Image (tube, rainbow, N blue to C red):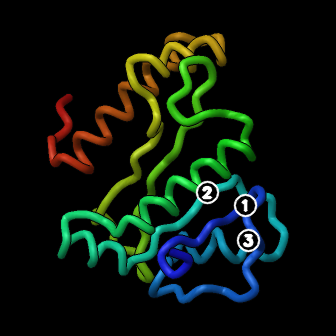
Amino acid sequence: NSKYIYPFGGSAPKPDEDPDKQIVGGKGLGLQVMSKIGVDVPPGFTLTTPLCQIYQKENDLPVDVWNGVRDNVVRIERDMGKTFGSSTDPLLFSCRSGAAMSMPGMMDTVLNIGLNDTSVKGLAKATGNERFAWDSYRRLLDMFGEVVLGIPHED
């Protein structure tokens, strides 16, 4: 799955060469380059643009890609000392779209992935700020609804 998943930051190996911008997008390339030159970027991973084409055709991703995503989540959990979906101090992810060239309005960011009815209480406890935790959860639901499900914002 190394042709579809590019890890960066934390314990991920530093890339030997820069990946193709057409494959990882502008944001993904930037993270790879920063990681390569020693900038301390938070751990994460980039899913390549060909995966979008596979998903659109198959309505799913290959099993080895799902396994690679799982392996990278475990790596990031170790690096961050947190657990995705934890009820005490959850690890959260953001999902950012990217292409080789900026395409405004194509897809926005979805933040706070990993919050749910249980983990939001853990975030409140870990931060000591219940309002922040619930607002973060609200933002996840709002962004996911709009970006993924196409539900428009309401004022």
104 above or below 37? above
User: Which residue corresponds to the image point at 71% horizontal and 88% vertical from the top-left?
Assistant: 17
Image coords of residue 69 (percent x, y): 50, 58
Amino acid type at circle 3 is Met
Residue at position x 70%, y 77% from top?
A: 33
Q: Which mark is residue 34?
A: 3
Query: How far apart, in angstroms, are the residues tagged by discs 2 and 1?
Result: 6 Å
Q: Secondary structure at mark 2?
A: strand
Circle 3 crowding by C-alpha within 10 Å: few under 14, some 14–19, many from 20 = some
**Which residue position is annotated with label 2?**
44
Give the amino acid at mark 1: Gly
- Residue type at mark 2: give it: Gly
Mark 3 residue element: helix
Dot 3 or dot 1, earlier in sequence: 1
Could you tell whether 53 is left or right of 16 in the image? Answer: left
Q: How many residues crowd around disc 2 within 10 Å: few (fewer than 14), some, or many (20 or more)?
A: many
Q: Position of residue 68 (x, y in %)?
A: 52, 63
Compare residues 129 and 76 and report the one nearer the observer.
Answer: 76
Is 25 positioned to the left or the right of 49 in the image? Answer: right
Spatial distance from mark 3 to mark 1, Cα to Cα?
Answer: 9 Å
Q: How many residues crowd mark 1 within 10 Å: few (<14), some (14–19), many (20+)?
A: many
- Residue 54, numbered label: none
On residue 9, the disc is: 1
Give coordinates of residue 18: x percent, y percent: 66, 86
Which is nearer the N-term, disc 3 or disc 2?
A: 3
